[in-house]
Amino acid sequence: MATGRGVATAAAISLLLIGGPSARAGDDPLDIVGGACVPDSATVRAGVYETRGFGVGFSGNSTGKIRLLCPFNATFNMIGKKVGTIFLNVIDDDGMETGARIRATFRHAALASNVAVTAGTCDSNTSSFPGPHNVSCTFPAYTIKINESYWWDVLIERTNPRVNVELLTVGVRGAPQ
């Protein structure tokens, strides 16, 4: 007959072997690479985008807008967690200048609804760093719910064909304390 101590020991050992709840992949939001995003119909018709390795940017000397819809897969372990920080990994060669920018908007909608609600937005032009870099933006804490869908709505704009601009990855993290 198993004792209380034996059961507790077995449970502790199994957690060490398979990892405790905080060690499982999928417990926290993960980043998505730009190449996994889907361009909207207007972007496809304009023919201005290209995938570059795992990122997305303008093809050749094209200018205009690229709109990408990027999936955000809320796993069961994320339900009830608060998010409030966006990490935007980009190449924006002109920093805060107006030749190019990337804006990532974290959106959600109730199931069976076509009404999108904005939780937070991050803009590469809030950073003065040119070239590849990470931009971190905060928004009011939002709790991931089981009865909602989530996605990224990313807009890449370029008015100067000499400026390199590319979405590398976008992700969300927990709310700042």
Image: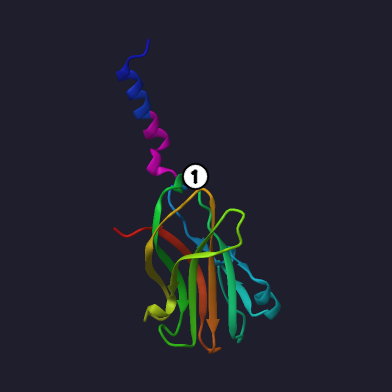
Q: Secondary structure at mark 1?
A: helix
Residue 22 magenta: yes
What segment is highlighted magenta in the picture? 14-24
Query: According to the image, label 1 marks what residue?
Result: 76
> In the image, is residue 167 above or below residue 5?
below
Residue 58 vertical placement versus 115 (above, below): below
Q: Residue at x 55, y 64 (%)?
A: 116
Residue 32 sits inside the magenta stretch: no
Secondary structure mainly formed by the magenta segment? helix
Residue extending farthest right: 45
Task: Give coordinates of residue 95: x percent, y percent.
Answer: 41, 83
Which residue is painted at 56% across and 88% down in the image? Answer: 161
Residue type at tag 1? Phe
The picture places residue 155, in percent across and down from the top left corner, at 54, 75
- The vertical placement of 81 against 85, above or below, is above
| Residue 14 placement (x, y as % from top left) | 40, 29
Q: Left or right of 46: which side holds 130?
A: left
